[in-house]
Amino acid sequence: MASFVSTFIAVFVLLPFLAYIISFIFIKEILKSHKRAVQISADITTFLLMISVHFIILAIWEQSYLWLLFIIVFLIGVIIALVHWKIRGEVDFGRVFKGFWRLNFIVFSTAYISLIFIGLIVRIVHMI
């Protein structure tokens, strides 16, 4: 059972990079646009990054901080909506959601990479 759980977590940890690469190649072949392929691939992998960050946190600290991830996502949405409202004077929900989703991609990509390195350091320290 333990090997199944570790395999399941490993798949989710590696899945965002694989999903990004595969979707990028596939979309670029269809649309023939590098910029659009990057945007759509980032949109596709954002949710996978969120799940991966949760599982990496579980693997490192053996405790769920899913509530904190939800708060971060909620705060990003509020901040994007407020900034959009201040600049434009009205809220265009399509543009707000696109900005919200892309900022989540950046935040969770950074968190993902940082947590991978933190996890490696924690494991090395535990081995010593």
Image: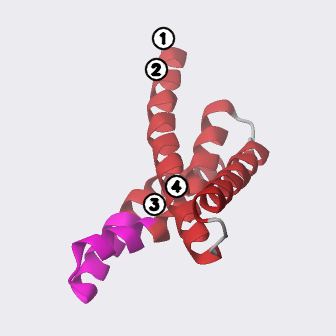
Disc 1: which residue: 128
Label 2 is placed on what type of residue? Answer: Ile
What distance separates the C-alpha of mark 1 from that of mark 2?
6 Å
Label 1 is placed on what type of residue? Answer: Ile
* Nearest to viewer (mark 2 / mark 4): 4
Residue 42 horizontal side relative to residue 97, left or right: left
State the extent of the magenta-drawn residues as a range.
19-42
Disc 2: which residue: 124
Disc 4: which residue: 103
Give yes or no for contact between labels 2 and 4 (Cβ–Cβ under 8 Å): no
* Nearest to viewer (mark 3 / mark 4): 4
Label 3 is placed on what type of residue? Answer: Leu
The residue most toward the front is 89
Residue 1 horizontal side relative to residue 67, left or right: left
**Which residue is painted at 62% across and 48% down in the image?**
55
From what the image shows, is residue 28 above or below residue 38? below
Instruction: Give the mark, 4 or 1, whose residue is nearer the N terminus.
Output: 4
The quarter holding residue 58 reads: top right
Give yes or no for contact between labels 1 and 2 (Cβ–Cβ under 8 Å): yes
Give yes or no for contact between labels 3 and 4 (Cβ–Cβ under 8 Å): no
